[in-house]
Image: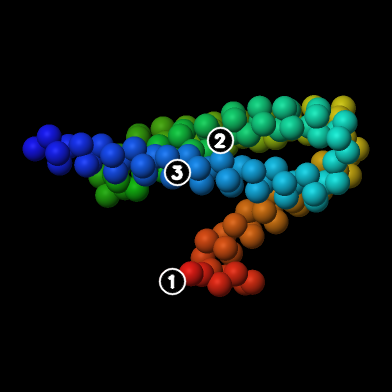
Amino acid sequence: MKKIALYILLFLLSFNVFAQHNRERLKALKVSFITEKLDLTEKEAQKFWPVYNDYEKVTSKIRHQDIRNIRREIRSSIATLTDKRAKELITELNEAESILHKQRMELSAKLLEIIPPKKIILLKIAEDDFKRKMLERFRGGKGHKRKN
């Protein structure tokens, strides 16, 4: 019994290490992609990345915990969801999305002090392009052959 528990523990730990490695790799790819697309100077990059990383930390928590939990509850209980609880969930979801929007506006205001406005627009384009490329890669789409 102890051996089985040990194997399960080792499996879970190795899975966690791989997941952490993948997150770090994805973050490094994103940093590289955005830096290239924005053509950040060294001085701009030194000021840009701390601000952007703070923004990512806050919004990631909202997207990956708060909104995910709301959607999970909706999916798991949609058949038995009361109108009262449905309204509460809509309010919670709207509040979370409102916070995301507010964070984006604050990011833009902070970045206007660091980089030219055109680069802020390029940032949005670069983020969208990066997401699209990662989705295509994940799905095995355009320009990327999935390994079997």
Which comes sooner in the sequence, label 2 or label 3?
3
Crowd band around label 2 with a 10 angstrom C-alpha radius: few (<14), some (14–19), many (20+): some
Tell me if label 2 and label 3 are in contact, CB under 8 Å.
Answer: no
Q: Is residue 145 above or below residue 68?
A: below
> What residue is shown at x 52% (from left), y 38% (from top)?
63
Q: Residue furthest front?
A: 3
Colouring of the image: rainbow
Residue 2 left/right relative to 22: left
State whether residue 90 appears in this view.
no
Which label is found at residue 148? 1
> What residue is shown at x 61% (from left), y 42% (from top)?
27
Residue 56 left/right relative to 19: right
Gap between marks 2 and 3 measured at Cα: 16 Å
Which comes sooner in the sequence, label 2 or label 1?
2
Q: How many marks?
A: 3
Q: Which residue is mark 3?
A: 19
Amino acid found under the numbered disc labelled 3: Ala
Q: Which residue is mark 2?
A: 60
Q: In front here: 40 or 68?
A: 40
Query: How far across and down, in percent of the image, does residue 43 sit?
Result: 88, 31
Gap between marks 2 and 1 measured at Cα: 31 Å
